[in-house]
Image (cartoon, grey):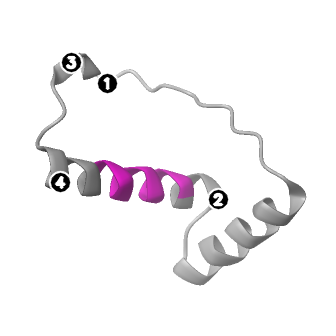
Amino acid sequence: MEKEIKHIGLRVSPEVHEKLRYIARYEGRTINGQAHYLILQCIRAFEKEHGPIPAGGEE
């Protein structure tokens, strides 16, 4: 069974877009791949400090 994929629309300034694109290319990723990587890093850091996020994200 395939996992459902969620789409996120993200609005950024042209400057942020260009800088993210530069970093993504440097890291060998697409912009989407870089954003996904950064989100996962944020989740790992949060869980390291606060413990696992409960299933469903509810407190």
Of residues 37 and 41, the one drawn nearer to the viewer in this rendering: 41
Q: Name the residue type under label 3.
A: Glu
Circle nearer the viewer, 4 or 1: 4
Magenta: main secondary structure: helix
Read off the residue under disc 3: 59
- Quadrant of the image occupied by residue 54: top left
Q: Mark 3 near mark 2, Cβ–Cβ under 8 Å?
A: no
**Range covered by the magenta-colored residues:** 35-43
Residues at marks 2 and 1, CA–CA distance in whole angstroms: 22 Å
Residues at marks 3 and 4, CA–CA distance in whole angstroms: 16 Å
Quarter of the rendering occupied by the N terminus: top left
Q: Is residue 45 above or below residue 57?
A: below
**Residue 31, label in figure:** 2
Observer able to see residue 33: yes
Mark with earlier residue (3, 2)? 2
Read off the residue under disc 4: 49
Residues at marks 4 and 1, CA–CA distance in whole angstroms: 28 Å
Circle nearer the viewer, 4 or 2: 4
- What x and y, as percent, mark residue 27? 53, 79
Mark with earlier residue (3, 4)? 4
- The residue located at (55%, 68%) in the rendering is 29
Read off the residue under disc 1: 3
Residues at marks 4 and 2, CA–CA distance in whole angstroms: 27 Å
- What x and y, as percent, mark residue 24? 61, 71
Left or right relative to 13: residue 24: left
Residues at marks 3 and 2, CA–CA distance in whole angstroms: 31 Å
